[in-house]
Image (cartoon, rainbow, N blue to C red):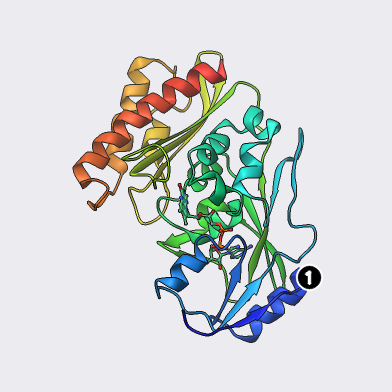
Amino acid sequence: MMRFDYAEPATVGEAVALLGASPGRAAVIAGGTDLLVQMREHVRAPAQVINIKKILGLEALHFDPAAGLTIGALTTTRAVETSEFVRRHYAGLHASVVHFASIQVRNRATVVGNVCRASPSADTLPPLIADAATLLVQGRSGTRTVAVEDFCTGPGTTVLAPDELVTRITVPAPPPHTGKVYLKHGRRTEMELATVGVAVTLTLDGAACRDVRIVLAAVAPTPLRAVAAEAALRHRFVDAASIAAAAEAAAAEARPIGDVRGSAEYRREMVGVLTRRALQQALEAGR
Ligand SMILES: Cc1cc2nc3c(=O)[nH]c(=O)nc-3n(C[C@H](O)[C@H](O)[C@H](O)COP(=O)(O)OP(=O)(O)OC[C@H]3O[C@@H](n4cnc5c(N)ncnc54)[C@H](O)[C@@H]3O)c2cc1C
């Protein structure tokens, strides 16, 4: 590992000042489960590592029936996994952290770190996008809100400016009769990145679809909203025929590549299978 400077700011203001002082050469560290691996493997060599763990107030995890869910920058995936209100109101997000790494990693890995890593196979991104979550971003010139859907620009890249960090995630409260599902498919169930992931958030109006968001993981450079699949369902009766049409549309929208985890053809096929399964489960959950 190369030599680097190390800082432990006490406030978000200090952290963004440090980031701004060496633009593009400093890296924020939270749990370190991605950054340290990248530094060991010489994928990244920041001149300065800024540890945000000493900043008070970033471990928030709370739910308000009107405002929704707040997840602070230091909230671990384990805290989300063991939260009763996440399990009850955000079943897709909950599912995404259950088969995530190992319990040791989950005790360190933050949800915000998973988002900022911007991996196409990141598990928390699809359900957060399906739930229309937003990020609060702070830089030297103030704060701004970014939809998680607009955050990733490519594998490992985001819209963050060099002096900006994410302080929290907000996930809107779900309307009644909303079913949420995240299905992760890998070569094994534990300690595995997704070969394909599908998140669905489906809101019903009787037997019809009032709204739906379908998000695919690991089949494009960034998490992908399957907008044609959503259009095949929105304001229509949710039945076997419309679910099959949506699943077919999702498979057509995927832009997979082949790698050690699976061929492009296999991934596309699995998008169809998992989308159909996720919609059926979301329909049951939303009734
Ligand atoms: C053995 C192992 C298994 C894994 N399994 C999975 C898995 O099943 N699914 C999965 O999705 N991932 C998995 N990962 C990846 C990793 O654990 C997650 O991405 C984790 O959530 C990252 O969080 P962290 O707090 O450790 O981030 P860090 O490593 O601290 O940071 C990750 C990136 O985000 C940036 N960052 C962190 N916080 C902020 C912030 N507040 N503002 C701006 N930038 C920030 C950092 O600069 C860095 O670029 C695994 C990793 C390991 C080592």
Image location (x, y in percent) of residue 105: 54, 51
Quadrant location of residue 247? top left
Task: Name the residue that disc number 1 marks.
Answer: 11
Vertical position of residue 137 compared to residue 215: above or below: below
Q: Is residue 238 visible?
A: yes
Vertical position of residue 55 compared to residue 168: above or below: below
Image location (x, y in percent) of residue 39: 46, 73
Toward the viewer: 65 or 93?
93
Q: Residue at x 37, y 34 (%)?
A: 229
What secondary structure is found at the residue carrying circle 1?
Answer: loop
Image location (x, y in percent) of residue 117: 50, 61
Tell me: is circle 1 under 8 Å from ligand 1: no
Looking at the rendered structure, the kind of residue marked 1 is Thr
Q: Is residue 140 visible?
A: no
Q: Residue at x 64, y 74 (%)?
A: 50
The quadrant in which the C terminus is found is: top right
Vertical position of residue 178 compared to residue 119: above or below: above
Q: Residue at x 42, y 27 (%)?
A: 278
